[in-house]
């Protein structure tokens, strides 16, 4: 198969999600050998069967170092190496105030939006270094990480911290030929977002397919000039 990612091994975390599945489909359409990473198998295996080609479904807890080690070993055993990591895992939660002392909210957001970035991207970067791969790592951040809002301290802090991790890792590995970047969407047009904001103008939002194309841009040779960039993908929102 020919295409921009022909022969490349592209690992997509959160592969069965609204954005992750769009990345999986777009990468497969460009000839990639796609690894679908999820915490539960059913949706990922269904998607893998849908796209066909060379795929691999791997179950992993990306906040646990040993689980990520096993993920990398599994991919290497099947395909030899990882060329691209598209990390789409993340989540949103609001309502807890700083003065309300809801420490569980902060813990949940850090465990979902920060810890997997630090562990997964760091370990994949080390794999690329060990293998001598001029690889690409692209993380999904959020515009919400740029500024706090009432009730959103846990979420915005976790996203801001993840951005600092991306920038730091990019500076650490760029001279080894590894590109680490991120996209920073506004609101992505997904069924859960529509349900939570039914009166919004959905036409202003970014579609999963548009966000996926931004990820593949940074993961391709077209993104050669970018290191530590958080690409704004706002649509008109």
Image (tube, rainbow, N blue to C red):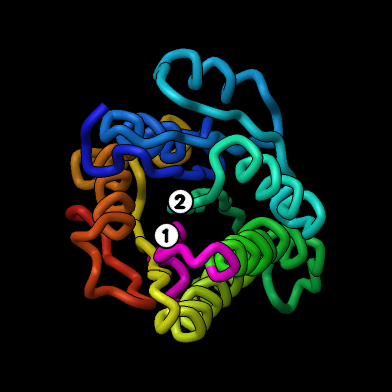
Q: Is residue 144 above or below residue 211?
A: below
* 120, 184: nearer the viewer: 120
Q: Would residue 41 be seen by someone viewing this image from the given angle?
A: yes
Look at mark 2 in the image and give the residue it sits on: 86
Which residue was labeled with disc 1?
138
Q: Is residue 151 magenta?
A: no
- Tell me if residue 145 is in the magenta stretch: yes
Q: Is residue 159 left or right of residue 102?
A: left
Q: Position of residue 117 (x, y in %)?
A: 60, 63
Q: Residue at x 61, y 54 (%)?
A: 93
Residue, x 46% and y 25% (percent of image)? 54
Residue span colored magenta: 129-148
**Left or right of 37 on screen, residue 180:** left
Q: Nearer the viewer, residue 98 or 6?
A: 6
Q: Are marks 2 and 1 in contact (CB under 8 Å)?
A: yes
Separation (CA) of disc 2 from disc 1: 5 Å
Figure quadrant of residue 138: bottom left
């Amino acid at each position: 198969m020919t295409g921009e990612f022909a022969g490349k091994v592209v690992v997509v975390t959160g592969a069965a999600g609204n954005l992750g599945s769009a990345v999986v489909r777009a990468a497969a359409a460009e000839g990639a050998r796609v690894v679908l990473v999820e915490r539960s198998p059913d949706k990922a295996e269904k998607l893998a069967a849908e796209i066909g080609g060379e795929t691999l479904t791997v179950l992993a807890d990306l906040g646990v170092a040993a689980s990520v080690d096993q993920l990398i070993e599994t991919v290497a055993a099947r395909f030899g190496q990882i060329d691209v990591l598209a990390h789409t895992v993340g989540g949103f939660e609001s309502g807890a105030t700083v003065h309300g002392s809801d420490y569980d909210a902060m813990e949940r957001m850090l465990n979902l939006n920060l810890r997997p970035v630090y562990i997964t991207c760091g370990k994949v970067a080390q794999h690329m270094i060990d293998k001598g791969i001029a690889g690409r790592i692209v993380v999904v951040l959020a515009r919400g990480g740029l500024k706090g809002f009432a009730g959103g301290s846990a979420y915005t802090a976790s996203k801001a911290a993840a951005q600092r991790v991306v920038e730091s890792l990019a500076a650490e590995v760029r001279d080894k030929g590894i590109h680490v970047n991120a996209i920073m969407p506004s609101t992505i047009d997904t069924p859960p977002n529509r349900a939570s904001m039914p009166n919004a103008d959905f036409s202003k939002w970014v579609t999963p397919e548009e966000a996926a194309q931004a990820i593949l841009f940074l993961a391709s040779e077209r993104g050669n000039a970018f290191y530590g960039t958080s690409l704004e993908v706002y649509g008109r929102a």
